[in-house]
Amino acid sequence: MTVLSLPAPAKLNLFLHVRGRRADGYHALQTLFQLVDLCDRVDLEVTQDGRITRDPPPSDPLLASLADAQDLTVRAAQLLQAHSGSALGARIHVHKRIPAGGGLGGGSSDAATVLLGLSRLWGLGYTRQDLAALGLALGADVPVFVLGRSAWGEGRGEQLTPVALESCWYLILHPQVAVSTAEIFQAPELTRNSPAITMRDFLAGESRNDCEPVVRGRYRQVAAALDWLASYAPARLTGTGSCLFAAFGSEAAARQVAAQAPVEFSVWVAKGLAQSPV
């Protein structure tokens, strides 16, 4: 096998609590990751020259501005190559559907899919646990995509406990603006002392996204999108945004609201997944 084409699913943070700053400078978090069937697709082709390339360059202007050395899929392949000592290379082609800078984890998911796919193509035999540990160096969201199940997350988000969530449909809305994660986590007004909660607390409605008030105050497009969606169903930011979502009991109900979205918003209707399609 020298060619492989694999999906890379998006995620939603059903809640996100910031519990404080850690000694290493990162924030201590609690979150619940829900995988959804909104997916990028990653094409991988083995090469014999040892080179790692992304071809063609990303069409998204935000991603296209990154040099190969900064591209998360290229970095994932290079990390795996260096760790394994493989002499093989790869050409990577990512078909993007997940918007960049939206809090849906598209870049992390693409990187996780590269790790999983190249481990197989290069015949490395790494376990998912091996690849999750390796992927943490690329970003705190990479392990949940490698392990491939919706999960309760703690620490930086990498301490994962798989959970079984009720089947649900989501309307995901992108207000056509990218939010800087670094900006939000550095904001002085960000709540950093949320108490720990349990799954029972979450199910009882005792949760929120601590980043949402900060993003709402700094990005008027996000505030407008939240207000619009909240007029139909409880709406929440995912990650640091800019995407937001609302849950519905059926695909038809979600599509009925999606059909009424203002033209300045991009919308998707996606099903929650218990297991990654990878």
Image (cartoon, rainbow, N blue to C red):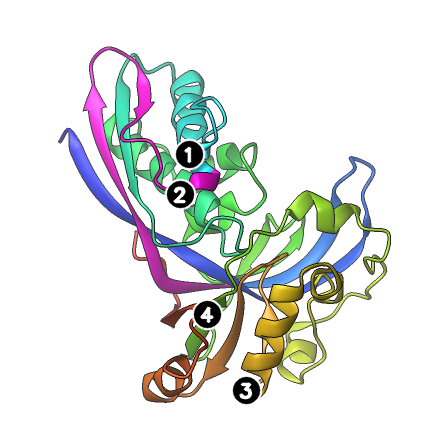
Q: Position of residue 230 (x, y in %)?
A: 59, 83
Q: Give the residue type at disc 4.
A: Ile
35 lies above or below 2: below
Helix, strand or loop at label 4? It is: strand
Which residue in the structure is indicated by mark 3? 233
Say if mark 4 contacts mark 1, CB within 8 Å.
Answer: no
Residue farthest along the front direction in this orientation: 263
The residue indicated by pointer 1 is 64
Q: Of the residues under marks 2 and 3, which one precedes in the sequence?
A: 2
- Looking at marks 2 and 4 on the same chain, the residue that comes earlier in the sequence is marked by 2
Residue under the point 33% across and 56% down: 39
Q: Secondary structure at mark 2?
A: loop
CA separation, marks 1 and 3? 35 Å
Write down the region rendered in magenta: 34-62
* Residue identified by numbered label 4: 172
Q: Residues within 10 Å of mark 2 (few under 14, many from 20)?
A: few
Q: Position of residue 210 (x, y in %)?
A: 74, 64
Q: Residue at x 81, y 64 (%)?
A: 194
Which element carries disc 1, helix, strand or loop? helix
Of labels 1 and 3, earlier in sequence is 1
Provide residue 249's location: percent of width, then percent of height: 42, 88
* Residue hosting label 2: 60
Q: Nearer the viewer, mark 1 or mark 3?
A: 1
Query: Are dots 2 and 3 in contact, CB under 8 Å?
Result: no
Amino acid of disc 1: Ala
In the picture provided, is 131 more to the left or to the right than 56? right
| Inter-mark Cα distance, 1 to 2 | 6 Å
Q: Earlier in the sequence, mark 3 or mark 4?
A: 4
Residue nearest the observer in this picture, 265 or 203: 265
